Amino acid sequence: MTTALKPWPYPRWVAHRGAGKLAPENTMSAFRLGAQHGYRFFECDAKLSQDGVLFLMHDATLERTTNGHGIGGELGMGEIAQLDAGSWHSRAYAGEALPTLEALARWCLANHLHLNVEIKPTPGQELETGRACGELMNRIWPKTEVQPLFTSFKPDSLKGARETAAHIPRGLLVDKLADGNGDADLKLALELDCSAMVLNHALWTPELVAKVHGAGLRCSSYTVNDQWAAQRLIDLGTDGIITDRVDMFSPAQSGEHL
């Protein structure tokens, strides 16, 4: 017996961290550049500052994408806002700031764009970061708009988001199948009342897509940067493709062939 598919009001194509690698990830310049390439659905990484503000950054540590040092979540937002998050990428983006999740969300709302928030907690803050993401969206995201999508590799982060904003769809991120066939991961996604599973794109097979769709969940993939890989996922009937290559894939390509 198959279950009706969860609603999925999102575009197929998702710009990874704003504009992939064309601009410094998780900065407003990146999201603006992604929008200039026609993207309407954006993925970002959110974590908590020491004083409880959600800001955008992928790594737990600051060194790779800023001029700072140490763990980002151990700084207050006042310190985080002063970091240079652009010079590592290129001189054109020198001085770029790390935005708050609220700033990005309000930009998306003002421009009628869709948002995928990957809850990326500093280790040990899984539950509270998820709760904070839900609380923020409850406060600023109108119920009349298409809701954001919360995703995470951390079940506790998805639990926290469900506690504070159960109405916002959730997706379980998976990089390696726990049992080889996806049954354990699907069971966990269903226990978390997820709307989707978001897998490393190489993990999807016709059997797994059928299994996940049969359970009522959507199938999405990261990070897809090759034509052949994207075409394979389209042919498999998956629902979402997260890409760095906003310059290669047009989000208008929602049909069966690239």
Image (spheres, rainbow, N blue to C red):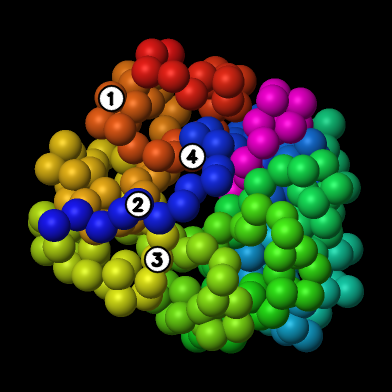
The quadrant holding residue 41 is top right
State the SS at label 3: loop
Residue 235, numbered label: 1
Task: Name the kind of residue labelled 2 in the image.
Answer: Leu
Q: In the image, which is nearer the foreground, mark 1 or mark 4?
A: 1
Q: In the image, which is nearer the foreground, mark 2 or mark 3?
A: 2
Span colored in magenta: 33-44
Relative to 134, 27 lies left or right: right
Q: Image point 24% across, 63% down: which residue? A: 186
Distance from Cα at disc 2 to Cα at disc 3: 11 Å
Q: In the image, which is nearer the foreground, mark 4 or mark 3?
A: 3
The quadrant holding residue 257 is top left
Residue 5, numbered label: 2
First in sequence: mark 4 vs mark 2: 2
**Residue contact at pointers 3 and 1, CB within 8 angstroms:** no
Mark 4 packing: few (<14 Cα in 10 Å), some, or many (20+)? many
Q: In the image, which is nearer the foreground, mark 4 or mark 2?
A: 2
The quadrant holding residue 54 is bottom right
First in sequence: mark 2 vs mark 1: 2
Q: Image point 74% across, 32% down: which residue? A: 35
Task: Name the kind of residue labelled 1 in the image.
Answer: Asp
Mark 1 packing: few (<14 Cα in 10 Å), some, or many (20+)? few
Q: Identify residue for label 3.
A: 194
Where does the C terminus fall, quadrant-wise? top left
Instruction: Please say whether residue 41 is one of the residues in the magenta stretch.
Output: yes
Front residue of this view, candidates 9 and 40: 9
State the SS at label 4: strand
Residue 4, numbered label: none
